[in-house]
Image (cartoon, rainbow, N blue to C red):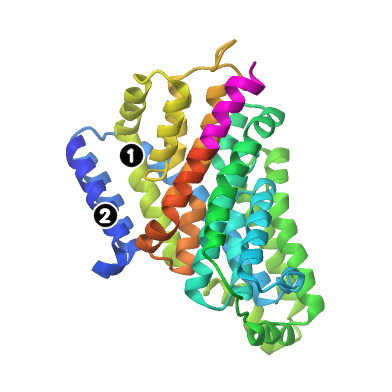
Amino acid sequence: MELLMIIVFIVGYACIALEHPIKVNKSATALLLAVVLWSIYALSGSFHETEHLVVHLGETAEILFFLLGAMTIVETVDKHGGFAIITDKIKTTDKRKLLWIIGLITFFMSAVLDNLTTAIVMVALLRKLVSDKKERWFFAGMVILAANAGGAWSPIGDVTTIMLWIKGNITSAMIIKETFLPSLVSMIVPLAVISCTMKGNVQRHASSEKAEVTSASRLQGRIIFFLGVGALLFTPVFKTITHLPPYMGILLGLGLIWIVTELMHKNNPEGYSRFNISSILQRVDTPSVLFFLGILMAVSCLSEVGLLAQLSTQLDKIGDIYLINIIIGLLSSIVDNVPLVAAAMGMYPIAEAGHFAVDGAFWEMLAYCAGTGGSILIIGSAAGVAVMGMEKIDFIWYLKKISLWALIGYLAGAGTFYMLSRFVLHT
């Protein structure tokens, strides 16, 4: 059974990667892959409790509802021309300067929000700043790298870092202190290389930007912008106060914005039909949400069977904690980093001293590697999948143009962490 499931997963993964050559939508493949894997598990005789399936579906649904809420908020801000507040401040059209500006903004924004939300917001901004689709793909690729790097050094920037923080494996101050520089290196290295390949200026969507401003007043755009950004920023605060999952915070923000837009356009039938949330929901990329559902449920089946736990056990035989974490990061570009980190946390209990103590080198590097390793492949992180769906980026294109530099940046950051850990911070 396990061998068959591995083969099915590899075939399904290959079909997702070859979406354009075989002309089959990746969302359809991901959904089919999830159902086939769970069906094999059920027919094997080992599956007895549907509660396990419901638990995995619930965990996946948390991400889906968060994604749906965040995408709807961003679309609402975009529809009202709210992003002009930022795009108007970015005057440069030089490709290199713009790439550095986008990269640095994404890196620090991701630490405050999270990598998924930041990626969605930045892609919406890019659509205003860069008109050419293929040129915009390079910027979107940098958004993925910067969002994952920025999320790795913040306790609230990435789901795996949040897991380690909530469970008490790391503390806020130490994760920032020990992983900020490695994360910055992992972004700067590919950013420097990619920027060297870019020349000339970008062309903006000037006409569409003006259309947005005229169709929704500048004041309305600012109101929705600050409400939207405030809702996104308030989500981690809401989680801290109530201890409810992040998707509840994002749905709270969406509900408030929904009410505001209803009242804002109630006396303008034309504006109401264009700017109410019901119509904006039709613009949200539903296939990307379904792709998330399929790929996460497929990986959860492998986790339920115990294949990921077996993988972690094999890694344990390596012995060197730094090499183990580097491999976990590489694996996180293929399978979801959440079950990998969960398996590692289960294998290594918190010790009183040493690498596995609170804020030990193993946990800090695990946060870095699991957070940034997913950038190597476009479907290796939530941010990558979201950007892939929004911009329709080809898997093979990303593999050819971005993956190598993402890998070099990842290894450079890992090397930086090793040097700091061995010779500076832990001496």
Query: Which region is colored magenta?
Result: 413-427
Q: Please tell me which of labels 2 and 1 falls first in the chain.
A: 2
Q: Amino acid at mark 1?
A: Thr
Q: Nearer the viewer, residue 261 or 193?
A: 193
Left or right of residue 401, residue 253 in this image: right
Q: Residue furthest top?
A: 352
Per the image, the residue denoted by label 2 is 14
Count residues near mark 1 (Cα–Cα under 10 Å), then give few for <14, some for 14-19, many for 20+: few
Residue at the (52%, 77%) spot, across then down: 132
Q: Quadrant of residue 94?
A: bottom right
Q: Amino acid at mark 2?
A: Ala
Count residues near mark 2 (Cα–Cα under 10 Å), then give few for <14, some for 14-19, many for 20+: few
List x then y, in percent, for residue 147. Answer: 58, 51
Per the image, the residue denoted by label 1 is 50
Residue 175 within the segment the image draws in magenta: no
User: Which element is circle 1 on?
Assistant: helix
The C terminus: image quadrant: top right
List x then y, in percent, for residue 160. Answer: 53, 37
300 versus 23 height, above or below: above
Residue at the (65%, 22%) spot, across then down: 424
Does the rendering let one see residue 415? yes
